[in-house]
Image (spheres, grey):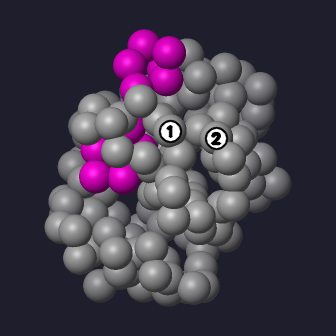
Amino acid sequence: MMNIADYIDPQLVAFLEVESQTEAIDALIDLLHKEGKLPDKEAFRKAIYHRESLVSTGIGMGVAIPHAKMSRLSEFFIAIGLQQQDKGLEWNALDKAPVRIVFLIGGPDNRQAEYLQILSHLTVSIKETESRKKLLKAKTKEEVVEFFVG
């Protein structure tokens, strides 16, 4: 049985104070690179922006899930960005709501079933309004991880 907490690392949590979708994505990619998760930072950045150009990853409810799968990645990872400014970020989301929670996912391109499970578990964990509020109230990286551990 998959546990989404297995993919959550406090070193990959960022409290963002950015002005745009691009700044949020770039900050999370920089964090992933700093933590040694990306064998090719620019190829990953290009893949993320290519995916975003196809259709917005703003799923609604103030949440976006930009993602890319690449053959050079051996394991899945999730970088979490929590926008600290109440106004949120324009993301062209399905419900047009500004985004305050960003889950940036990367992983191998040959494990589609695992990838879909990750997406499903993330979506379930933040489906309820109170859950999203609780996550946004987190003040430390450890509190963010604890949210997913339950």
In the image, residue 140 lies at what x, y percent? 60, 85
Disc 2 marks a residue whose amino acid type is Ser
Compared to 78, does 10 lie above or below?
below
Disc 1 marks a residue whose amino acid type is Glu
Residue 40 position by quadrant: top right
In the image, residue 32 lies at what x, y percent? 70, 51
| 3D distance between C-alphas at marks 1 and 2 | 7 Å
In the image, residue 62 lies at what x, y percent? 36, 52
The foreground one among 143 and 133 is 133
On screen, residue 38 versus residue 73, left or right, reads right
- Where residue 20 is drawn, which disc sits there? 2
**Residue wearing tag 1:** 90
Q: Are marks 1 and 2 in contact (CB under 8 Å)?
A: yes
Compared to 2, does 76 lie above or below?
above
Identify which residue is drawn at 59% across, 38% down: 21
Compared to 40, does 97 lie above or below?
below
Residue 17 appears in view: yes
Neighbor class of circle 2 (other Cα within 10 Å; few <14, some 14-19, many 20+) is: some
Which segment is the magenta one? 51-64
- Going from the N terminus, do you reach mark 1 or mark 2 first? 2
